[in-house]
Amino acid sequence: MSHADFVHLHLHTEYSLLDGACRLDTLMERAHELKFPALAITDHGAMHGVIEFYQAARAKGIKPIIGCEVYVAPGSRLEKKKVEGDKYHHLGLLAKDEVGYKNLIKLTTEAHLDGYYYKPRIDKEILAKYSTGLIAMSGCLASEIPDLIMKDQITKARDAVDWFKQTLGAENFFLELQNHGIPEQAKVNKQLLIFAKEFGLKTVATNDVHYVEKGHSHAHDCLVCIGTQDLLSNPKRMSAGYVPEQFFLRSAEEMKARFAEVPEAVLNTREVAEKCNLEIPFPKAGDTRFYPVFNPPEHFTRDGYLRHLLAEGLFRRYTIHAKAVGKEFVVSSIDEPTRLPTFNPSQPNQDEAIQVVIDRLQTELKIIELQGYISYFLIVADFVQYGRSKGISCVARGSAAGSVVTYLLEIANVDPIRYALLFERFLNPERVSPPDIDIDFADDRRADVIEYVREKYGRDAVAQIITFGTMGAKSVVRDVGRVMGLPYGDGDRLAKLIPAELKMSLAKALKQVPELKEAYENEDVTRELMDTAFILEDLTRNASVHAAGVVIGPEPLVNLLPLKLDDSGTLVTQYAMNPVGELGLLKMDFLGLKTLTVIRNTCEMVKRTQGIDVPIDSLPLDDKKTYDLLNRAETLGVFQLESGGMRDLCKKFQISSIEHITALVALYRPGPMDLIPDFIKRRHGDIKVEYEHPLLEQISHETYGILIYQEQVMQATQLLAGYTLGGADLLRRAMGKKKVEEMQQQRETFVKGCH
């Protein structure tokens, strides 16, 4: 037999929260090293890590087998009452194909939505309904058949075997043999081999994998204690007969040796792997088939309705602006709802600047229509308009402000022409990726808008998105110290030595902090704690609901991805934000912003006490008293300007325009902060404003020759190296995400373009 003759079919990743210690990257490295041709994921009760597992396995040339160790209710999943014996049994299920994958999604969703009682549970009724395309394994000692065998209820065990065989078919039901040195397993295995002959079923050998390396056993024990709020020293915490250092990713040779008396059980794992040929369909960029469809009013097509709204927006946005500066202009052809207004040079009062807007609008529309995002923009415009109609403050943030379309639809309130914002940063025609419109809502009314979306597109087609917390460097040190039984002060002392920086790791902290390194080298208890923490660091720890993420589907989401409920009964995806997007679903951020609530409440108070309507969306941007207030650093409660550092910066800089505020906010973050002293000196004329190249003056004159904004980087790339703005956005993304290899490739293109 070779490496290829055995495949692990029972494996818990880090997504078996606080029970599995297999980090996906470490797991795949080890599986590749052991030359496994395939590998299964069977996390407890949910499919949280399926997509990342699938992609990580493929990246290592390993065939991913998608499964789940489900919990089976002893009776009906709908019964939520205490019964004698176990509240549930374990059962391993594997998807053979796309039909099996979709049925697994339905089973795990049903387990969370209707079957939840202590654990998410299915029952035999629903398993029979969704059994097509699935392989079942009889399971560990916590499963129905082994449990009955241990209780010497052989007749009931035989009936259970018969039910699974009849329900799934003999070719799809395997009797699972395990050997972790637990006495009961020998008894169970002996009877399972008898059943195999009696029913004509095949056996499979599995190891109940919970961690990657044998030496990770102690760390896994700590992980379980963290989850159960227990201490390692508690003698009652482990079930009788538990043997440590057994639940790791054994090599094929170790499994063959362990099951030498039943070599066919080892070989059959390969047969199961060969039966499982799931191809998860990841739509290509620009594929919007899983996006919801916006239904326009009667007599309108979708593109016609979008153009109608844009025509109205042109008059509303730019006529008001022109009047504000003492001019008016006229735009012709507004009566035709399916056409955009066109510039008419024969009308003498028309502000010629509108031509720039029309040209930009036509360019954006062409890209939006070509990439199939018309419904997307209409959907966002619709729920933003609904929010505003109900007095809910709504406004887009981020790159969406670079679109004239979002400005005219009143999704965004910033004129991208006025502030030289680039559409290509928002939607890049050279890199077809979904637009990303993040909307801020007054935090106390955000739920109202989400409820509107549920009512409009179907309650079963809208869900919030799950997010996962991980065991960061500081928290894992405290947690491990606690389960080791150390005084709180000991773990806290070590945790406080770890610098409070983003992406700070234990290894990095050991290099940077001499005191921590000294404690690690000279204190035995500290070394044990840290060595354990190294293994558990960054493991997925818990699940919660993403603060903003919402997904809207064109049909019930259970047809596309697994779901669960949060504590309040809200529908939530089992997949995190990135996998949801990679599956081609429409995800968007509904952000609750306290500042918008404060602003609204303040305006209402002013109206109530002073009788003054504050025009909050059209305040003048040249009010000297406001700038004087900022320059005195009286900015407590002002969003992004209230920290001590920002208040000090306002005093030193002496703000006199809205552009100054945006520049300071952009600069006041790690990295760009180094440019602040030079920026202040240039502002006050203490040093001469110099440009790295004469061409850069036109794009950085306003920022005193310093490139502050990502748009400036894109424009500089275009001017100096001849990039298109779409190509420049690819370079900007590589810079922002610190993709070294891509940056090196871009350097060659950039230098060549400069010549």
Image (cartoon, helix red, strand yellow):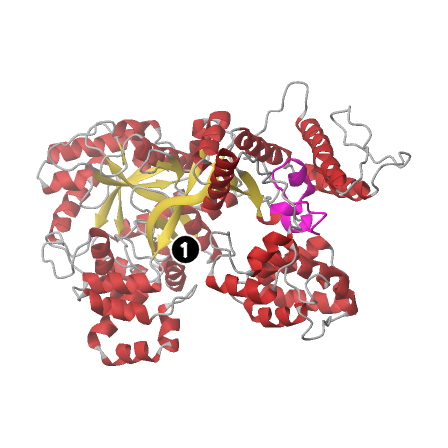
Q: Residue at x 59, y 61 (%)?
A: 664
Q: Quadrant of the C terminus?
A: bottom right
On screen, residue 294 above or below 467: above
Residue 429's place in the image compared with 200, above or below, is: below
The quarter of the picture where residue 530 lies is: bottom left
Of residue 573 and residue 173, the one placed in the foreground of this image is 573
Q: Which residues are magenta?
A: 400-426
Regarding residue 661, the answer to whether it shows in the image is yes
Q: Position of residue 687 (x, y in %)?
A: 68, 75
**Quarter the N terminus occupies:** bottom left
Q: Nearer the viewer, residue 345 or 535?
A: 345
Residue 235, given in percent of the width and then of the height, sits at 9, 58
Instruction: Identify the residue under disc 1.
Output: 37
Residue 259 visible from this viewpoint: no
Q: Secondary structure at mark 1?
A: loop
Asked if residue 421 is among those painted magenta in the image, a careful observer would answer yes
Report x, y in % for residue 303.
Answer: 69, 30
Say if the magenta span includes residue 444: no
- Name which residue lies at 33% across and 57% down: 22
Left or right placement of residue 225 versus residue 434 in this view: left
Among the 4 quarters of the image, the one containing residue 329: top right
Depth check, front residue: 191 or 732: 732
Front in this rendered view, residue 548 or 682: 682
Q: Amino acid at mark 1?
A: Pro
Residue visible at 17% across and 66% down in the picture: 487
| Picture residue at 71% right of the left edge, 66% below the top | 750
For residue 433, side relative to residue 77 (left or right): right
